Image (cartoon, grey):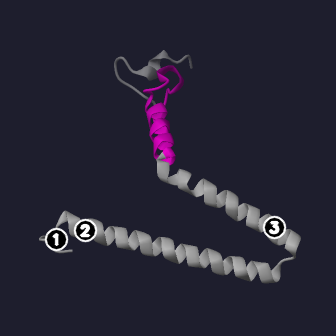
Amino acid sequence: MSQTESLTDRTTRAAQWRFAGAGVAAVARFAIGIVLARLLSPADFGVVALAFVVLGLAGPLGDLGIGSAASAAHGAACAGWLYPRTAPRSCDGRPRGGAGSAGRLVAR
């Protein structure tokens, strides 16, 4: 990447890669569906097709940022911001210390 590349160029290139990746994923899913339709019985393929539908509907939820929000909430809980009395240790297992620390408030 050159220093003179504009934000518009970078955004356009990123969007092209994103669309190309989505296209390859769609073709791969279609090909896998064809192979499974040939290998499985109609009843078994119906179960697989139902799973494809459920995963297809659940996939966009991953783009909503729910995972990032859950991770941030876990980090806040680990740091003692959400529940200071229940977090006597930091996320890496070290005891909390210092004056006014939430760790001192927990009965040990």
Q: Who's the residue at 86% across and 74% down the image?
A: 42
The segment highlighted magenta reads 66-90
Q: Residues within 10 Å of mark 3 (few under 14, many from 20)?
A: few
Closest to the observer, 70 or 106: 70
Instruction: Measure how far apart labels 1 and 2 are at the Cα level.
Output: 7 Å
Q: Nearer the viewer, mark 1 or mark 3?
A: 3
The residue beneath circle 1 is 5
| Mark 1 secondary-structure assignment | loop
Q: Are marks 1 and 2 in contact (CB under 8 Å)?
A: yes
**Whether residue 34 is situated above or below residue 54 in the rendered picture:** below
Residue drawn at x 35%, y 23% is: 98
Residue 21 located within the stretch drawn in magenta:
no
Q: Magenta includes 85? A: yes
Along the polypeptide, which appears first: circle 2 or circle 3?
2
**Which labelled disc corresponds to residue 10?**
2
Left or right of 15: which side holds 22? right
Please report whichever mark, 1 or 3, sits nearer to the chain's N-terminal start: 1
Q: Which residue is mark 3?
A: 46
Q: Nearer the viewer, residue 1 or 101?
A: 1
